[in-house]
Amino acid sequence: MAARTPALETFPALRAWQRKALVEYLRRRDPDFTAVATPGAGKTTFALRIAAELLADGTVDAVTVVAPTEHLKTQWAQAAARVGIQLDAAFRNADLHSSADFHGAVVTYAQVGMAPQVHRRRTMTRRTLVILDEIHHAGDSRTWGDGVKAAFEGAERRLMLTGTPFRSDDNPIPFVTYERGGDGLLRSRADAVYGYADALRDGVVRPVLFLAYSGETRWRTNAGEELAARLGEPMTQDLIAQAWRTALDPAGDWMPQVLRAADARLTVLRNAGMPDAGGLVIASDQQAARSYAKLLEQVTGEKAAVVLSDDVGASARIATFAASDQRWLVAVRMVSEGVDIPRLAVGVYATSASTALYFAQAIGRFVRARRPGETASVFLPSVPHLLGLASEMEAERDHVLGKPKDREGFDDDLLERAQRDDQASGELEKRFAALSATAELDQVIFDGASFGTAAQAGTPEEEEYLGLPGLLTADQVAMLLSKRQAEQLAARRRRAAERPAESPAAASAAPPAPMSAAQRRVALRRQLNALVAARHHRTGQPHGKIHAELRRLCGGPPSAQATIEQLEERIATVQTL
């Protein structure tokens, strides 16, 4: 028996951006349509509504969804079934055809790349709508891109979806339109765009607070030399990579302290209106993931769920966690993109992955809002490149072809080299060894601005930030962070005033010690944020827009990773606005 045509009247109500994009799609009736929407905005619902419209009016007879992972195949099929569209998530290339009970199938990009002729035959046999989810994956390899193009160039309609920056390389993405700009470079063009800033304003996504932790790290190099560095301080990329790796070592103190802080934040959210709030630790590899799970059990007294991408039953474990009230999930890359666990509200970015694409995909797991006022908190190492990505959450990016490529902020080859276990070739050559690491709350990043001063883990100052209310609007978050920062500074001034006064002779003999570069940067960030807040109250402009305007006028990276000279220039500039 043929699958029934889905009933449009039973569809859930669409959000404003979905209605606008649907009207545009139906008005244009073009073969190709690209929609870029922030994670959590509802791309799946939008795509299924288009599928239902085209099936109902006879434009297409079948639907094929192409997803990045096996888990997402199941997720797509379940979402489609809820609105009356039956998709075969178990389809194999050897099957050639789906049962007549289905409107179509869900496959992966890898599956299409392995046998594009199978999917081309299916597409040519019936008028087909092809939904290409997270379309940037079609450029992951030439085989995938060529396979997708060969399989679906004869489709009646193609709908491309993505929620993250397209790509940082020159691999063109099939069926995406590129237009040449004034600089002669080709840029991807989307037909519908709904960014994080728009979704935050509409209450569709949560405000995200980034809690960046620095700390002292010590390690032994492959040559046997012992080095020490403070995470977050200016240093070479090679040293950043090794300090970063040392901080993430499960045997050190940095990870237990950060996990303890993250779990304390999770408890605050659970007690403040999100009783089922869950946490996710994103690890670099399977060994680290298992170690972090053991640390969480020691911290919380409760076992953490562990999901490894090559484990049998990984998808089932994700579904079980999503439907439970278990506190923590630890994963490697399985939950980095597209996986829908709306109760995730606290994250620990314990991975060395540093591209803008991966970072955006990871943070996208925490932004989906279920009710007004929910916030998300992400704990991360105080690494300049990550701080910059955190400050640019609202940035919208296109895929640019032909642009000279600098490394994307951080040299991943250095990280890979730092993490590689070199084989010892003699007694004098020793493997890299993390010796010790301690954690310290460096700053809180929200709406492109940096708040707070250094606070040791486990101190009342850290608890002030971990105890921020869990139900707040974006404006309330910014206001409360400014207030907490002011209280923190006032308390420090009171403590300084309460110290025993020195004699005049001693005071003149011992002038104040000069501030370190780190202390100067903290003081300048604080001054800049105060001036930006003052301008916000005068003009009503959001803090993020004021910071963005200062970056446009003065150049340089976000304030979280700006140099002392750049901060001083922005302070001088905002005073003249």
Image (tube, rainbow, N blue to C red):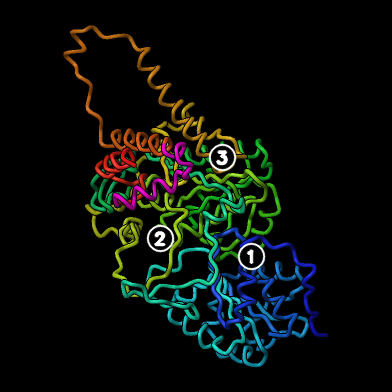
**Type of residue at label 1?**
Gln
Q: Which residue lies under the disc numbered 3? A: 263
Query: Magenta stretch?
Result: 535-555
Q: Nearer the viewer, mark 3 or mark 2?
A: 2
Quadrant of the rendering where the N terminus is positioned: bottom right
Q: Height in image: 484 above or below 353?
A: above
Residue 545 lies within the magenta run: yes
Q: Is residue 195 positioned above or below 477 on the image?
A: below
| Helix, strand or loop under label 2 | loop
Instruction: Give the structural element (helix, strand or loop) at label 3.
Output: helix
**Sequence-wise first label, 3 or 2:** 3
Residue drawn at x 30%, y 68% as measured from the top left: 405
From this viewpoint, is residue 305 visible?
Answer: no
Q: Tell me the mark number nearer the camera, choosing from 3 and 1.
A: 1
Residue behind mark 1: 18
* In-image side of 458 versus 503 (left or right): right
